[in-house]
Amino acid sequence: MTSQSFFTSRFSGCGVSRSSVSRSRVGRSSAAAALVIGCALALSGCNSGGSPGPGSTSSQMAAETPTASATATPTPTPTAVYKPADATGPAQNVPVPVLPEVAKTETKEGLEAFTRYWFELLSYGYETGDTERLSALSGPDCLFCKGLVENIETSWSDGKWISGGQIETPAVTADAPAGTPTFVTLQVIQKELVIRDADGSPYQEPTAATNSGSRATATFDGTGWTISKLSLIR
């Protein structure tokens, strides 16, 4: 089957009891000494502060100490790993492009950011076959845009898939005539692209890698940008 060009042709109280101490005059001093010793011994068994005294055992203390509850460590959620397409199957876990906030503004920076995003959607389309958002941001009169979408959809039909074909736009510059950005000139680099049949074999000859200049025209309708025209710079 004839090889077709893609972009270049159309992505956390101790009460001490004084127990019957003898009051005889003869043993008064001895009794007094005994009283002091007895009180000291009694005091050693009391603790007015409520904390364990010297006689308390370590097991008693442990029993009275609340046990700290263990804090469960959350299990991290596995991150899906991106895998590019090859002969064994289509790409997996391809990151979905995100529209930058600045791309929602009618400014030179906004148009440049939007154009980069549009080409990210184109690259995403090649890797996944999903062209829904790409189509929505392409104007009805953009024939080049329609051709790119149709090529992607055809390449992903009947169990086929695309390997390669990723796009980069290293240089994007918007022109702003009369203060209103309208045109964008950009460099588009696309990797070699291979359409694979259901068994993984090449459906046709690979499309060679390209490095080309493009020009896009965009319109802003108050809610966002749309690519209304796209062409190659020859």
Image (spheres, rainbow, N blue to C red):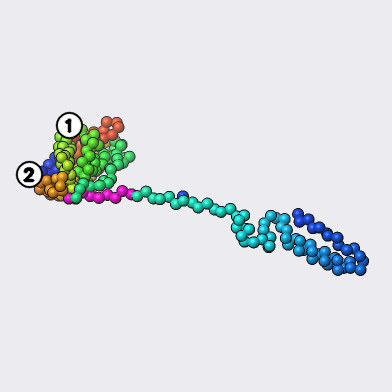
Q: State the image coordinates of residue 94 (x, y, percent, origin top left).
A: 26, 46
Q: Which mark is residue 141?
A: 1
Front in this rendered view, residue 66 or 176: 66
The chief SS type of the magenta part is loop
Q: State the image coordinates of residue 171 (x, y, percent, origin top left).
A: 22, 47
Mark 1, secondary structure of its residue: loop
Q: Which mark is residue 1?
A: 2
Place residue 107 in its image quadrant.
top left
Left/right of residue 85 with respect to residue 101 in the rendered view: left
Mark 2, secondary structure of its residue: loop
**Residue drawn where x is 69% and y is 55% of the image:** 50
Kind of residue indicated by mark 2: Met
Q: Residues within 10 Å of mark 1 (few under 14, many from 20)?
A: few
Left/right of residue 210 with respect to residue 44 in the rendered view: left
Q: Which residues are magenta?
A: 79-87
Q: Residues within 10 Å of mark 2 (few under 14, many from 20)?
A: few
**Residue drawn where x is 83% and y is 60% of the image:** 19
Q: Earlier in the sequence, mark 1 or mark 2?
A: 2
Which of pointers 1 and 2 indicates the residue nearer the eye? 2
Residues under labels 1 and 2: Cα distance?
30 Å
Q: State the image coordinates of residue 30 (x, y, percent, origin top left).
A: 86, 68
Place residue 100 in its image quadrant.
top left
Residue 57 in sight: yes
Q: Is residue 128 magenta?
A: no
Kind of residue indicated by mark 1: Asp
Residue 212 in sight: no
Total numbered labels: 2
Kindly give the residue lying farthest to the right in the view shown: 25
Q: Which mark is residue 187?
A: none
**Residue drawn where x is 28% and y is 43% of the image:** 96
